[in-house]
Each structure stands twice: as C-alpha cells, then as structure tokens.
Image (spheres, rainbow, N blue to C red):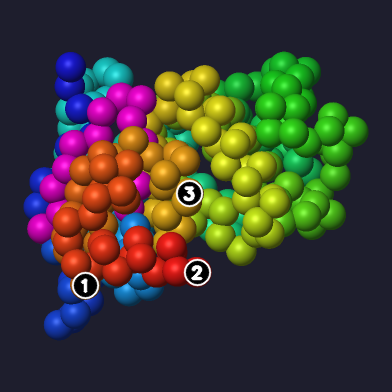
Amino acid sequence: MTPLLQVEGLTRRYGARIGCADVSFDLWPGEVMGIVGESGSGKSTLLNCLAGHLRPDDGRILFDTRAEGPRDTLAMSEAERRMLGRTDWAFVHQNPRDGLRMGVSAGGNVGERMMAVGARHYGQIRATAIDWLGRVEIAEDRVDDRPTSFSGGMQQRLQIARNLVSGPRLVFMDEPTGGLDVSVQARLLDLLRGLVREMGLSAIVVTHDLAVVRLLAHRLMVMKAGRVVEAGLTDQVLDDPQHGYTQLLVSSVLQA
C-alpha cells in the first residue's frame, strides 16, 4: 500500500526564527495524525505548509493522487493545487467564519463546494445539502438561514458539512474544537469521529488539547520549537511519554 501523504524534510523559516524544521512522516489511507505542542511550537506552521497555505523553504510533500499516483504538491501548478483543495483535500479552520461564506445560506455554503466540483442540478444540490446538514445535526428548516444566525458550534458543524460534501480523502483540522464550550466540544468530537470512520477519511489534526487527539488520532507527533520531539501511537505516547517535554505536557493536563 502507498502512503496517502509522504512528508520529507519539511522546513519553514521566518527570517532567523524556525517555524518548523526537518519534519518527515507518512500518513496512510484512513489514518488520523494528531500534532500537539504549546503555542509557538510550530504545529500550525506545519499544518499550513502541508495544506498549501504557506510555502516551505525545504522539503517535499508527496500526495497519492487518484489519476497519477504520488505527486509533489509543491511542484504542482496553482490551478492543480486549487483543484486538489476542492476535491481530495479539505481544511477545517478553528474559527468557522474563516471557512464559511457568512452572507450565504447554510444550504448555499454546502452547495458552493458541490458546484466547485461540477454539480449543476439545483434540486440535487439542495437535496444533498439538506442531507449533509442532517448528518452534522442541523435541522432541515435551517437550510435557508445564514450562518450569522447560528451558534459557534453550529457554525463549526456547517463548516464540516461544507468541507466533506465533496468526499475528500484528506482533511486538515486546525484546533477544530477551540473556543467552544466543553459540552459542545464533546458533541462535535463525537460527530467528527463518526464521520472520519464512516467515510474512511485521513486527517491531520492540530490541537493543544490532548483529550482531542486521544479521541480522534491513531498516531501523534509532539512538537517543540519547530521540531518533532516525540512520535508514536497516540495511547503509547500519552500513557508512557519518553521525552521530557511530552512528560510536562501530559502532567500539566493531569494536574489541571
């Protein structure tokens, strides 16, 4: 089996400061990778490099495309990367307003993603949008409401529907439960875990919340000062951390 994503020596600098340095890993079909670390550890820089939002200074990112097999996304044209972002890739922002069109209805937000990959039949687009709203626990009678009338948790669920309606194979998630109430977080995590399993998605999840990665991620990378200091199976890393920094992270949660 070929990895869905192969990352080799990924490095991004901000002048003299290192965003991320020499990061390498493989991500397999259906696997969820968690990336944790404190603010400034480099996890968001790494995620944005992987998703094509930032250009790394060094390294390769090979994605196993449907048509041509593994291709270096950094060598793709802008049009090819945009199409990848509409079809096989999706990005769930921490702030759902960054991933939604706030002036467009809930159904329109989901429908736009479908139209971007060629859907044109209004009735089918609307029916699929209503189906997806139901899958993320948004009532059908809210289909014509704008996201501005939704709670933060509903906006995040709508952003997830908008992202997943096109059937991507790889989803990037940046603090997907950040800023939500604890009860809302738990419901959203249950929803995400179910959709990831049901659709066979691969995902890369950046978070500072170890409970999130324990619930969602098969494997875990711990970052400090732009470098991966520990990696392994999630339960193994969290239950028996080897690096001093990981031990501090885990103990700070236990003491909270």
Q: Is residue 95 left or right of residue 151?
A: left
Query: If you read the primary sequence from the N terminus, does the residue marked by circle 2 or circle 3 appear first?
Result: 3
Say which residue appears at 78% left-offset and 55% top-offset.
151
Circle 2 or circle 3, nearest the eye: 2
The x, y position of residue 96, in whole percent, is 62, 55
Frontmost residue, 10 versus 237: 237
Q: Quadrant of the N terminus?
A: top left
Residue under label 2: 256
Circle 3 or circle 1, nearest the eye: 3
Say which residue appears at 46% left-offset and 58% top-offset.
209
Residue under label 3: 212
Between the residue at mark 2 and the residue at mark 3, the CA separation in whole angstroms equals 16 Å
Frontmost residue, 118 versus 158: 158
Residue 93 seen in the current view: no
Total residue callouts? 3
Residue under label 1: 225
Q: Is residue 220 above or below residue 55?
A: above
